[in-house]
Image (cartoon, helix red, strand yellow):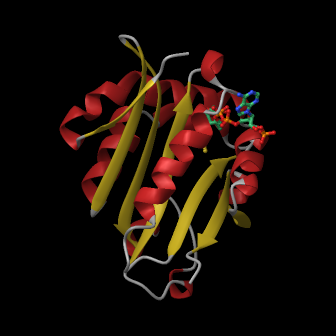
Amino acid sequence: MDLIYEVISEEKIELCRDLCNELMVFQKSNAYIKADLFDTMNFETRLLPSLKSAVHNHIVIVRDGDRIVGYVYSNISPKEAYSNNFATFFDLTSIIRKNVGCLSQFYIKVEYRQYGVGSKLFNMSLEWLKQFEDVDDYFIFVSNGNLNALEFYKRKGFSVSHDILDGFITVLRSHKQS
Ligand SMILES: CC(C)(COP(=O)(O)OP(=O)(O)OC[C@H]1O[C@@H](n2cnc3c(N)ncnc32)[C@H](O)[C@@H]1OP(=O)(O)O)[C@@H](O)C(=O)NCCC(=O)NCCS
């Protein structure tokens, strides 16, 4: 496979629309707790608002020729962004710094999985996240029923912290090594 990895600017986020919507459908199909919550989640309601509320954004897409076959979206956001009407994602008092890092959205088309593409995108994201000297805490939120992703992140060094929304989401955490 001759794949191209491309970091794109926020202005080009439209390129991720279809894959983001595919990710939401995928997550709904796996979920056994509150799966209906995904009905209102899509590119417009999830990705665009996250981009706007973040302090820094990082988007990588993977191209196979003209076709976009995967993307990962990470951001640095004020910790307060994670306590809202929807949920409190983690105990804000457990974070000393102002901002936290998050690997927020991650999706690779099914026929491109298991070839190391995910590991490459994960490493690019973490490298980007870890360059911010004033950020020590990193989060990933995995929806219920996605054991594959949960195990993937655990193997990459993240630990399960807790569940929220009655198990709808599992919160994974990692702390910068000094
Ligand atoms: C989670 C996800 C991003 C992982 O991407 P991926 O490209 O499959 O990841 P990798 O190929 O790097 O790693 C997956 C496995 O393939 C193995 N692998 C990597 N390269 C390989 C190769 N050349 N040959 C055989 N196996 C390989 C890895 O060792 C890894 O094995 P492990 O799971 O036992 O550790 C992908 O499965 C995905 O998009 N899933 C659907 C969406 C999703 O769940 N997103 C996360 C939401 S929180």
Where residue 2 sits: x, y (%)?
49, 17
Q: 61 or 51, which lies in front?
A: 61
Is 61 located above or below residue 94 in the figure? above
**Residue 122 shown left or right of residue 98 in the figure:** right
Residue 88 visible in the shown view: no
Q: 87 or 104, which lies in front?
A: 104
Quarter containing the C terminus? bottom right
Where residue 75 sits: x, y (%)?
38, 57
Is 139 located above or below residue 26 in the figure? below
Where residue 18 sits: x, y (%)?
41, 21
Residue found farthest to the front: 2
Identify the image quadrant of residue 159. Answer: bottom right
Residue at x-position 61% and y-position 20% = 112
Is 75 located above or below residue 80 in the figure? above
Is 64 located above or below residue 136 in the figure? above
Residue at x-position 57% and y-position 21% = 109
Residue at x-position 68% and y-position 62% = 158
Residue 133 visible in the shown view: yes
Where residue 165 sits: x, y (%)?
65, 58
Q: Quadrant of ligand 1?
A: top right
Q: 128 or 172, which lies in front?
A: 128
Identify the image quadrant of residue 77. Answer: bottom left
Disc tally is: 0
Identify the image quadrant of residue 65. Answer: top left
Quarter containing the N terminus? top right
**Residue 71 shown left or right of residue 14 in the figure:** right
Residue found farthest to the left: 11
